Every structure is written in structure tokens, then in C-alpha cells.
Amino acid sequence: MKAYHQLIKGPVITEKTHLLRSQANQVTFRVDIKANKIEIRKAVEEVFKVKVLAVNTIRMPGKKKRMGRVEGVKPDWKKAIVTLAPGEKIPGFEGP
């Protein structure tokens, strides 16, 4: 198992994640592809000092990219949607 700060790669910031954050108190992270739900829950609770109710994970396939005639593939990655307990917030994720 990796250290908790290495499991969480960074936030996923899109219009949909902003809606999830404001309506359902959920935040979305890009996480290590080998991490499971239990490790992600412990990492978020340890790093951000919040109470996590649920973790949903999705394996996102890498997209095909072209440079002229040469075609390549970006690597696969994993997304975690974390549901926080009512009243819990992560600093830096609060909106206006």
C-alpha cells in the first residue's frame, strides 16, 4: 500500500463535479489506478480530516490521440466520487 498522500493524485474539476459538490456534498478525485475503496476512504479522511460516508470508483479508459499519421493512447486512470458527511467540507473545494 502506498502512503495516503500518494493515492490521491488531484481533484477532478468540471461542471458536473461542481454540481455534485453543491447538491450532494460529493467531491471527485483522480486516484491511483490500483487503489481500492477502503484505501481511498482512509486517505481522504486522513489527509483532509473529514468524515466519509461512501466512495464510488470508476475506471476511465485512456483516449486515443493522433499526431499526424501516428496514433497513440493516453493511459487509463481511476476516478473516485467521495460522499462526505452532512456539514463536512474540504478546504479549497468550497464555491462562492
Image (cartoon, rainbow, N blue to C red):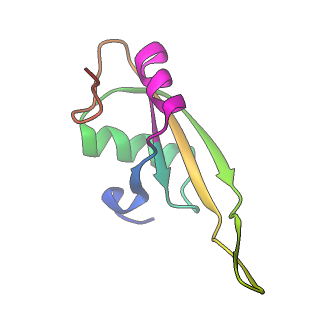
Quadrant in which residue 87 is drawn: top left
- 53 shown above or below 12: above
Q: In which quarter of the image is the N terminus?
A: bottom left
Q: How many labels does the image show?
A: 0
Residue 20, compared with residue 36, is above or below; it is above
Indicate whether 87 appears above or below 72.
Answer: above
User: In screen coordinates, is 92 left or right of 71?
Assistant: left
Residue found at x 26% / y 46%: 47
Say which residue appears at 68% left-offset and 64% top-offset.
62
Residue 24 placement (x, y as % from top left): 48, 16
Q: Position of residue 25 (x, y in %)?
A: 42, 19
Magenta segment, which residues? 13-28
Give the dominant element type of the magenta stretch: helix, strand or loop: helix
Residue lying at the far bottom in this picture: please name it: 70
Determine which quarter of the picture holds residue 42: top left
The residue sitting at 50% across, 23% down in the picture is 20
Q: As rendered, which of 96 and 37 lies closer to the eye?
A: 96
* Residue 70 painted magenta: no
Q: Residue lying furthest front in this view? A: 68
Q: Nearer the viewer, residue 56 or 3?
A: 56
Quick check: 9 above or below 38? Answer: below
Residue 8 percent coordinates (x, y): 40, 54
Locate residue 34 relative to residue 2 in the image: left or right: right
Q: In this view, does 50 lie to the left or right of 59?
A: left
Toward the viewer: 57 or 52? Answer: 57
Residue 50 as seen in the image, left or right of residue 9: left
Q: Which residue is drawn at 29% across and 20% down?
A: 88
Q: Where is residue 71 in the image (x, y as percent from the top left)?
A: 75, 81
Quarter of the picture containing the C terminus is top left
